[in-house]
Amino acid sequence: MVAVGGRSEHAPALLVTGAGEGRDPAPPVDRFGWRCRVAIVLLPLVITAVFIGLLTRPALPAPTFWGFQNTSELVRWLVELVSGVLVEAGGFAAVGLLTALALPRPRALRARLLRYLLCIVLVAAIAGALHLVRRDALLAPLPLMTATLCGLFGAWIGVQVARGRKPARWMLRQLLAALLVIGAGALALVHFALVDERLPFDVAPIRSEDKRRLVRQLRSGHYHPKFGVHARRLLLAQDDVDRLLTWGLSIGDVPRRARVRFDRRRFDLQASFDVPFLTSRYANVTVAGEGEVVRGVLDVELDELRIGAVPLPGFLRSQLVAWIIATIQEDADARDVLASIKLLRPQQGAVELVYGRGQFGSRTLPNLLARLGAHPDLLTATRAHVRHLVDAGREVPWGSQRFVHFVHAAFSEAERRSKTSRPELENRAAIYALAILLGHHRVEFLVGPVLDRELRREAKRYTSRVRLRGRNDWTRHYWISAAIALLSSEAASDAVGLLKEELDARIGGSGFSFSDLMADRAGTMLARAATRDEASARAMQRRLSGKFTVDALFPPANDLPEGITARELRTMYGGVGGPLYRATEAIIERRLAKCAALR
């Protein structure tokens, strides 16, 4: 009823029966938008790609002792490590992102939590499947936690994007702020970790007589009845351990130094490293704690681990020790090394080592040197090359060209295997195989056990009497020096060859020989040219898998002086570096420069 002009009139009633009566009903709200549909399609594809990528990705070789000495190789390894971690983290983050976007738009906290829970389930499923297929270490606590965190990070981004533009903009601001904080924290960490001065300690000097004494001491040992009839005990003073550290750290292109102090079951290690590419900056490391090995079981507890002015907290130290122990247990060679040690325990001013004598020399030492000197896949490649050369030796004709035939067989196989492998590694393995078979069987210590009993018997039968220009000794010099060159710099390898010649000049030796020295130098040059980089390695394979003569590998040397005694070397040649010595050395270098395979 409506009042009009003081009176009432009835107005027609407006009947409302529903919001849609009188017009077409509104379509229902589509909670599965275009983002959701795209995510639903992409999610299984991304999960499959992450699984296959992790399943087929080759494991990154652990950095070797000699790799740590070369800055460029170490930087390359770190780049490969960081890139691999970023790719893996990006894959799991993508899984989390698409998981969050594949569900309907979240309207409540419960819906957002569901996304995070589903993301955790998917990451765990991928890790579990990898573990079942290839026993992957991703199921270990730390890698699994890292993968889960990356997945949750991607899910968080997906949740904010699904909630709308405003939450997405807030998320971007948070990400930028986090990146700035992380960047500033990283710069501050580097600033405090790298200092202006080295740690104030004196470096133990290491001389030639010290090296010979240490080698004799390491080879010796006294009977220790507590651990069996074959156990031997060795007590190394901390000064000798310092000299061993100085000896090991002296190899490489970055100055380093270290010292260690021992107390009862305690050790205190200090080390200073020059930082590549940064002048007058040093990484000082201090490690202190308790540790011992008893019957192959390693027990270490770190009380302090400091890099510069940055101490690592206790939980990180514990994680580091756990990772080291787990890495040793997962590696067959490292397990063998540890198993051969009956006792390794710090004493007052010394360290006590008890080891199984036979096992330590025949198995443990070669495996240890393999871990220090080669990539893990180098041992497998060297075994394959040795097997190939022994088989090829059945067909290689006897005579003056036997040396050339073996080189041709080795590098032809290296070229074939390089279709699925790195040519530098294959050339390195080929040279090691030639050095083991034609140089000296103890070269096997450089890469680990290669020859079993049967293969050793076949090798002796089919790879013997290989002469270089009619001389067996030149063959041995050539390949031993080539193998040594693969372990260190060219200059260090030349020094080893020169040391051998100087030792020969002692009473009872064969005397100094310039022809032997040229064979040493030629082997060093071949190893360097064959493994310098990928292009050089492939060029060497093409050259030595085709037609060539011995002139490409080694020039005539019959007219060079031999059998020079120590007195003659000193009086006639002026010693090493004297006028006549340098003149003869120049003749050698000119001849070697004409060898096509040595350039």
Image: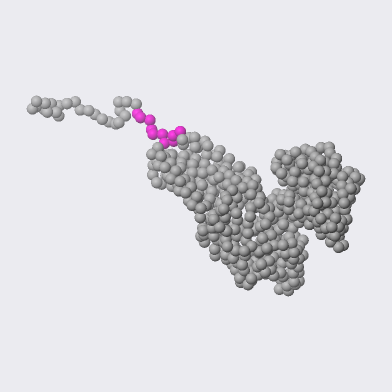
Is 57 in front, or is 575? 575
Q: Residue at x 51, y 53 (%)?
A: 191
Rendering coords of residue 165 (x, y %): 40, 37
Q: Determine whether, in the image, residue 413 is placed left or right of residue 130.
A: right
Say whether residue 286 is visible. Answer: yes
Is 70 in front, or is 382? 70
Q: Residue at x 77, y 41 (%)?
A: 599
Say whether residue 466 is visible. Answer: no
Q: Which residues are magenta?
A: 25-34
Q: How many marks?
A: 0
Q: Determine whether, in the image, residue 41 is placed left or right of residue 500.
A: left
Is 426 in front, or is 155? 426
Tell me, yes or no, whether the highlighted magenta stretch contains residue 29: yes
Tell me how the rendering is colored: one colour
Q: Is residue 424 above or below residue 228?
A: above
| Image-quadrant location for residue 361 | bottom right
Q: Is residue 582 above or below residue 161?
A: below
Tell me, yes or no, whether the highlighted magenta stretch contains residue 435: no
Q: Residue at x 57, y 61 (%)?
A: 199
Rendering coords of residue 460 (x, y %): 86, 53
Is 313 in front, or is 156? 313
Residue at the farthest bottom position = 225
Q: Main secondary structure of the magenta part?
A: loop
